[in-house]
């Protein structure tokens, strides 16, 4: 694998370890984070104090690949556009890779802006959560052209167990919407099943041990059922972020005339969880709504 100069914009719970994998693989990394103490900690962890950039533009200067992993559409625009955004300094031939879960329309907007500057662009949201990022086991859903994908793929695979080109720009974000729609439905079903078992006086450990060996098995059951039974919700993707993702999917569904009644219902259930001050709980906290 060729050593490429990289920039990583956004060092949250996902970006921090993802950028770390790049550094450990030998790729020079410049980082930017809105909270500078977070970037300083990353640089200290990787013994590279010169890695911290004052602006996204400074981080992206001379980089072959620029990765962005921030919160939402507006956050992406704030680090991509303007005099201090990455597009201000990226050189023709470089590629911008947006790992943020955002809208497909934003992906197309970014692709058009990148093309005007002779840059490649990929929308590349990820799945696998914090643990997947830390262990280099993310799944990456990518939209863009084949040439840009093949250039970035070996570097993305440093922190991914799977990376697949899903189609033209926007296809990565649309695939991530499918992912979140499925997760929402699975978690609601799991919550109702465990709640039913509790009300019936069954031993939840025994129930899961049996049904997880059959057709009801899921990643959520294997990884979240025990903590759901204990009422512990500090182990994964937060409700606030899930609602953001579901709103993106619901908006796209209206545009595409795709019917998403269960997704809309579960989104409102998550709104109930937020009303219990559970916005920072993980998404398995849907069961708490049934217990009240």
Image (cartoon, grey):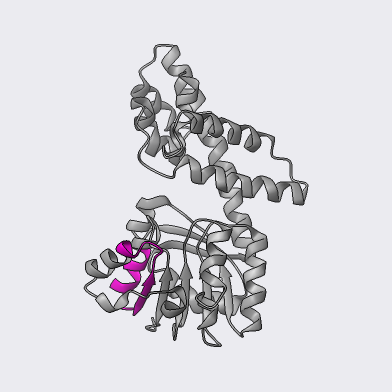
Q: In this rendering, would 137 be left or right of 119?
A: left
- In the rendering, at what x and y percent does residue 57 appear? 47, 78
> Horizontal placement of 243 versus 224: left or right?
right
Count of numbered circles on the image = 0
Q: Is residue 239 visible?
A: yes
Magenta-drawn stretch contains 22: yes
Q: What residue sits 43% from the left and 52% below the top?
A: 128
Q: Which quarter of the picture shows residue 234?
A: top left
**Residue visible at 50% across and 83% down in the picture:** 89
Q: Magenta stretch?
A: 18-38
Residue 287 in the image: state x and y as whole percent.
Answer: 46, 26
Q: x and y percent of residue 75 in the render?
A: 53, 61
195 relative position to 39: left or right: right
Residue 124, can we see it? no
Q: Residue furthest right?
A: 257
Question: Whole-percent x and y of residue 112?
Answer: 67, 75
Above or below residue 45? Residue 207 is above
Taking the spot 37% from the left edge, 25% from the top edge, the residue there is 229
For residue 101, what is the image quadrant?
bottom right
Q: Quadrant of the N terminus?
A: bottom left
Seen from this angle, which residue lies furthest front?
A: 83
> Is residue 145 highlighted in magenta?
no
On screen, 57 above or below 98?
below
Give me the residue at 61% from left, 84% from top: 117
């Amino acid at each position: 694998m060729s050593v490429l100069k990289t920039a990583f914009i956004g060092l949250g719970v996902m970006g921090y370890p993802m950028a770390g994998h790049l550094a450990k693989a030998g790729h020079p990394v410049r980082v930017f984070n809105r909270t500078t103490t977070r970037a300083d900690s990353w640089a200290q962890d990787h013994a590279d104090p010169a890695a911290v950039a004052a602006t996204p533009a400074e981080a992206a200067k001379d980089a072959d690949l620029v990765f962005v992993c921030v919160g939402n559409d507006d956050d992406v625009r704030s680090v991509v556009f303007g005099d201090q955004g990455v597009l201000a300094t990226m050189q023709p031939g470089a590629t911008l890779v947006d790992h943020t879960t955002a809208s497909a329309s934003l992906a197309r907007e970014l692709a058009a802006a990148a093309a005007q500057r002779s840059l490649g662009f990929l929308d590349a949201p990820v799945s696998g959560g914090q643990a997947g990022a830390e262990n280099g086991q993310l799944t990456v859903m990518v939209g863009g052209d084949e040439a840009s994908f093949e250039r970035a793929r070996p570097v993305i695979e440093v922190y991914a167990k799977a990376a697949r080109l899903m189609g033209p720009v926007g296809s990565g974000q649309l695939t991530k919407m499918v992912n979140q729609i499925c997760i929402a439905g699975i978690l609601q079903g799991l919550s109702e099943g465990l709640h039913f078992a509790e009300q019936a006086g069954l031993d939840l450990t025994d129930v899961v041990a049996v049904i997880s060996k059959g057709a009801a098995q899921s990643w959520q059951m294997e990884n979240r059922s025990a903590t759901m039974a204990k009422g512990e919700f500090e182990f994964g993707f937060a409700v606030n972020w899930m609602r953001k993702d579901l709103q993106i999917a619901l908006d796209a569904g209206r545009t595409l005339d795709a019917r998403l009644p269960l997704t809309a219902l579960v989104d409102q259930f998550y709104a109930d969880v937020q009303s219990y001050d559970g916005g920072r709980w993980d998404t398995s906290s849907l069961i708490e709504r049934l217990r009240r």
